[in-house]
Every structure is written in structure tokens, then in C-alpha cells.
Image (cartoon, rainbow, N blue to C red):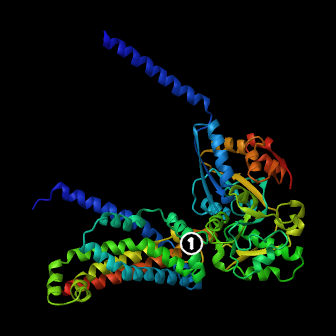
Amino acid sequence: MRAAILFRWTWCAMVAIILILTQGQAFAEVSGKIVIFNAGSLTIPLAQMEKEFEANYPQVDVLREAAGSQKCARKISDLKKPCDIMASADYKVIDKLLIPNYADWNIRFATNQLVLCYTDKSKYAGEVNAKNWYEILARKGVIWGHSEPNLDPCGYRALMVLQLAEKYYKIPGLYARLVANRPKENIRPKSVELVSLLQTGNMDYAWEYLSVAVQHGLKYILLPDQINLGNYRFDEFYSQAVVKVTGKKPGTFMDMKGGSVTYGITMIKDAPNREAAIAFLKYMLDPQGGLKILKNQGQPPFVPCRVPTGAMKSSLPEPLKDLVEVKD
Amino acid sequence: MKREPFFWVSISCGIVIMAFILLPLIQLLTSPSVGMLRESIGDRDVVRSIWLSIYTAGLAALISFVFGTPLAYLLARYDFRGKRLVEGIIDLPIAIPHPVVGIAILSVAGKNHFFGQILAELGVRIMGSVTGIVTVLTFVGIPFYLNAAKAGFEAVSPRLERVSRSLGASMFGTFVRITFPLAWRSMLIGIIMCSARAISEFGAVVIVAYHPMIAPVLIYERFEAYGLKYSQPVAVWLVSISLILFLLLRILTLHKVEEQ
């Protein structure tokens, strides 16, 4: 008798479990892993987006790998690492290294600007301001750095800011004088690494994106729009800055021309989890979703996001088309 | 004699392990073309970084030898309270993730730490310097030397040392004349292990010093900036040169064993 009751209960429980499991699957349209390769400077906002997104899609696991934007692209093009989404701190990296072989489109979704970061322990922290920063960086004994121009857009952008400063403040030779006071040892692979050098007191000043400075609670100096690379209205002035970076093989070089800081994002053509990746992008590029997080983290988004041509817009996955406008 | 199944299990496991180690290495060594290899060894940056790798690793081994030998001897000969703790501390660098080692060293070397301030006043710079690289490599390599040397000293009977001491030799004289000749092989193996560990270190070094570039950092940089094609030849050179160096050391030691 007892056995019969027990049997009936087990049976009911099993049916209940099966029902719950199948129901759960019916609710979540997408599931599985989404692999995102992202620029180091996007790490914190993306972490927040991941949390919010996964709360809505519990079946999805977002896996982020942060690196210099150039490296992110290399992992896809050279190492053939499986990846769904790639977000770059310079949309040109996607154009240059991923289109047309690994991606079809490139959505510009946010801007940023360069700031000079420091801490209260930095040398001359008491005197530095927007008017004298370049004098202080030229002083002997001040340790300042930027990221590797050959690997990280933030690196060549820092050099561009210095070149533009020479033009804007009309001080001939300023760029050369500043760079001469920055030994090669102060260069790091990616800009976010400089933050810990500042915080541990190994470095006095470092060039970072505004968003990174805000997210890490660093002190920073805001520069005029003419030189901070943050305002596309000054693109013409920015284009006077030219930095030589390494080309496709050792010993070759190419010129990077100054332009406003514009972030780009794309989905990789053979993304292992296409459905989920599109769902994530739809959330991320939504003004009420990911773009809002970016804004709060000091990284002004484009509302709506932009693609350069109508042809590119028509190549976007259907759910993303309403989120972008065509604007060069 | 009939072979038991266990024998065949051992053989097949051995083959699997050999293949596991050798397959990727052979793939690496054979992928770059001869032309690429020649081009990369003609590159001054490549030669400089390999040389820097070898001599910083060598320096780390030398420092481990000089400072580690007395401690290894102490641990092999004496029992004291807290000995287990000291041994545990010695093994710590093996267990800590490499980037953490780099971060830890940098945070002590920075101006926000009193030790870093002393260093700054002495004009010693850890970040981005050869001093920093050697510091990191010693940190990760020294446990290997200490453990090997300690095992070597433990294998020498204390009775021999006591005889020497009773005949009037000093502690130092006994060490030089009795203990060292019997234990030098273990010490040499310790030095090899320590420098092998040091030459392979990447994670901690890249945090402390990106420039000047040791070979593993250069390989990483080449990979990121130019892709696999240009990083592999450097890797091949580093692997081959360290392989030859370590083989030479092994052959030298083995040779002596047969003589005795």
C-alpha cells in the first residue's frame, strides 16, 4: 500500500519536473554562450550590460574577453577563435581587419574623449590643470605614459592629442619635447593597464579615455574639444595629427590620421550563436538598454547608432535595422 | 619472461604523454619557413630580446644560487619550529597566478608603498627595467632552486660532515670540501630548473616590464601586432636556443656521472 502511494507521488513529481523544464525552454527564445571580444575600455559597461541581459535571458551566458581592439581583431582573423560579437574602441579597426572576410557591417555606437589621468599622489598633482599640463609632462622626473600605439587605439590617440596640442597652443616643438620625456618603458600594451600603474604609484600621469577615468575613479584633466578627439565637429582639425604605426609585417609602417573617437561593433559572419548575439546587440544598441549604461559610464552613445551607408543598413540582421540611422 | 598487461598500459600511457608534449611543439617548430626564420634572426629586436631573456634568466638563477644555497642547506640540516611554514612560503610563488605576482611586485615597488619610496630615493626603478625583470624571474624561479638544492643536501649523510668537523674543519670548510662536491649535481639541476622556469615566464613580466622586451613578451607583441606568421619564428628561435642550452647542461652533468 505504502509503496503504491510512494510510486504515485514519484510519478507526479516527475511529470511536474518535466513540465517545468519544457515550459522553461518554451519561454527563452535564445540560449547558450555569447562570446564577445571587446576593447579594454568597454569592459566595465559591458559587464553591467551582461548582468542586465542575463537577467532577462537566464539561458544565455555572455563571455567577454577584453584586449586591445587590434588584438581582438587578430584573435578572429589570425587565430580563428570562435567569436560572436566584436566591439572596438576604433571603428576603423573593424573596417581594416575584419571587413569583408569576417564581418559584413560595422555599427558606430559610442564616442569617448582623451583625458590626462593622475592621482593625488602624482608628482605636481597640486598644480596640474588644463592650462599647464603640457609643461608638467615635459618636466624631468615626471613619469607618464600611454598605451602601445601599435596595439591599442588609445595609444596612437594619445600621441595625436600631443600633436594637436602643439598646433592648438601654438608651441612649436612641443610634441618632440614631450615624447622625449617619455621613455619607451612607460608604454603598456593596453590603456587600462596604466590605471593600476597610477594606483600603485609607479606612474604619475597616464592618457586614458574619459570613460575609463570615470569608471576607475581617477582624477583627470579635461582638455579643450579641439584636441581631446571627442567632438566630431573638429574632425578636420584632428586630421592634422598623423601617427606612424606598424603595418602588416615587422619593419613596415602605416600612417594613422587623427579623427574623433568612435566605437564600432559588429557580429562575426560565422558567429557560433547568431540568434543570441542578435538578441544581445538588440539590447545593447537600444537607447533604453545598453546605450543608457554607456551614458552613465562616461561614454556618450550615439542615439540612434550609425552606419555609413544605406547598403550597409540593409545588410544588418532584421531586428537591428530599426536601431540605426544612415549617417556618415 | 611474460609481459604483464600493466607493462603495456605503462607503455601506452608513455606514448600518449610523449605525443601530447611533442605534437604541438613539432607543429610550432615546423610551421615557419626557413626564409622567415632567417629574416627574424636578422631582426635586431629579436636577437636583443632573446639575449635579454637568457641573461635575465641566468641572473635570476645566479641570485637564487647565491642567496638560496645557505637557506637550502639550513632547511636540509636543521629542524626548528615553523620549518613547515618556511617550506610552505618557499613554494608559494609556484602556486600564485603569474599576473598576480607582477601586480604584487609592482604594488610594493610603487611610490604608495614605503619600500617603493626607499627604492625611488635610491634611484632603483622596477617598472619597465631590467632590474624589474630580474626581480620577477627570481621570484618565480627561486622555489625550484631551493627545493632541488635542499634535496641534494639531504642526500649527503650528516655523518660525513661531522667527521670533517671533528677533524677541525670549520662549518664553511666542511661545506666547501665535503657537502658541495657531493651535492653539486642537485644544485646544478636546481639552477637549470630555476632558469628554465625563468625563461618561460610571461604573465608576471609583462605587467612589470613591457619594455625592455624579453622574448616571450616580444612573441606576444608580434602576435598582436602582426599575427601568428611573425610571432612563430621568434618562438621557434627561443625554444631552440633554450633547448640547446638546457641539453648542453644536462649532457655535461650526465657525463660527469658516468665518469665517477
Compared to residue A306, the image places residue B30 above or below, namely below
The front one of A124 and A210 is A124
**Residue A144 placement: quadrant:** bottom right
Q: Is residue A310 left or right of residue A319?
A: right
Residue marked by disc 1: B114
The amino acid type of the residue labelled 1 equals: Phe
In which quadrant of the rendered image does the N terminus of chain B lie? bottom left
The front one of A311 and A162 is A162
Q: Is residue A252 left or right of residue B205?
A: right
Q: Is residue A250 visible?
A: no
Residue neighbourhood size for the residue with mark 1, other residues' Cα within 10 Å, grouped as few (<14), some (14–19), many (≥20): few
User: Whole-percent x and y of residue A142?
Assistant: 70, 77
In which quadrant of the rendered image does the C terminus of chain B lie? bottom left
User: Whole-percent x and y of residue B53?
Assistant: 49, 80
Outermost residue to the top:
A1
The front one of A281 and B112 is B112
The front one of B250 and B30 is B250
Q: Is residue B121 visible?
A: yes
Outermost residue to the left:
B1
Q: Is residue A114 left or right of residue B107?
A: right
User: Whole-percent x and y of residue A200?
Assistant: 61, 67
Q: Residue at x 88, y 67 (%)?
A: A226
The numbered mark 1 sits on a residue in which chain? Answer: B
